[in-house]
Amino acid sequence: MTNHSTKSLVYIAIGTAIIAALSQVSLSIGPVPFTLQTLAIGLVACLYKPKEAIASLALYLTLGAIGLPVFAGFSGGFAALFGPTAGFLWGFLVYAAITSVLTKSTSSPVTVFSACLLGTASCFLLGCLVFKFVSGASWSDTLAWTVLPFILPDLAKITLVTVCHSLLQPITKKEAFFS
């Protein structure tokens, strides 16, 4: 195993741990809890190369699927990947992929913000669709429970990701893994 692949595995594990830790900062405000998962996902996606960002999310989902309590509210289990909020969990993977790919070549604050906004929108879309399908809720209830309460908090998290990325960028540029 090369030094680069060892370092890559370590960063994937760190990214997964950060996502799992911030997933536990949770506030229940309906069927979908408010967490700091998307803040962690945005940071990992903007700082990591696409392969490592996606691998971090895939590992996070795998750990949750096998029952480790890494999902919001210290939950886990295979059923979480197919329940009413499963679309958000799968959407996190899409969020990481979109955001990481879009910020790979340029990392201006506008690009980071826009990429995170697009990633968040994709997560909302997938989460909303799965919630509607699995729960049988009306479209108005689905939007009221899964999207509307989260718009402003998610915009704040996207702004925080953008600021943190700008602050961390001088440090990460010195590390070959991030470039």
Image: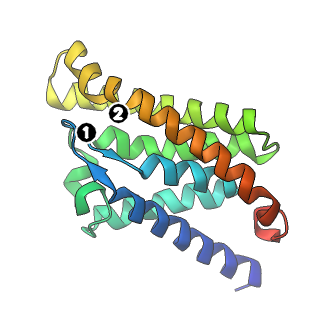
Which of the labelled discs sits on residue 127, or is there none?
A: 2
Q: Real-space Cα distance between discs 2 and 1?
A: 10 Å
Image location (x, y in percent) of residue 171: 78, 65
Residue drawn at the location 29% of the way across and 20% of the way down:
143
Kindly give the residue lying farthest to the left in the view shown.
136
Q: Nearer the viewer, residue 127 or 116?
A: 116
The number of discs equals: 2
Do the residues under discs 2 and 1 have CB atoms within 8 angstroms?
A: yes
Amino acid type, callout 1: Val
Above or below: residue 96 compared with residue 177: above
Image location (x, y in percent) of residue 33: 26, 43
Residue drawn at the location 29% of the way across and 61% of the way down:
65
Counting residues from the start of the chain, the first of labels 2 and 1 encountered is 1
Image location (x, y in percent) of residue 32: 25, 39
Image location (x, y in percent) of residue 163: 66, 46
Specify the quadrant that holds the C terminus. bottom right
Q: Nearer the viewer, residue 86 or 175?
A: 175
Which of the labelled discs sits on residue 32, or is there none?
A: 1
* Residue 47 in view, yes or no: yes
Name the element at disc 1.
Answer: loop
Q: Is residue 114 left or right of residue 139?
A: right
Residue drawn at the location 53% of the way across and 62% of the way down:
56
* Residue 76 in view, yes or no: no
Task: Give the quadrant of residue 112.
Answer: top right
Amino acid type, callout 2: Gly
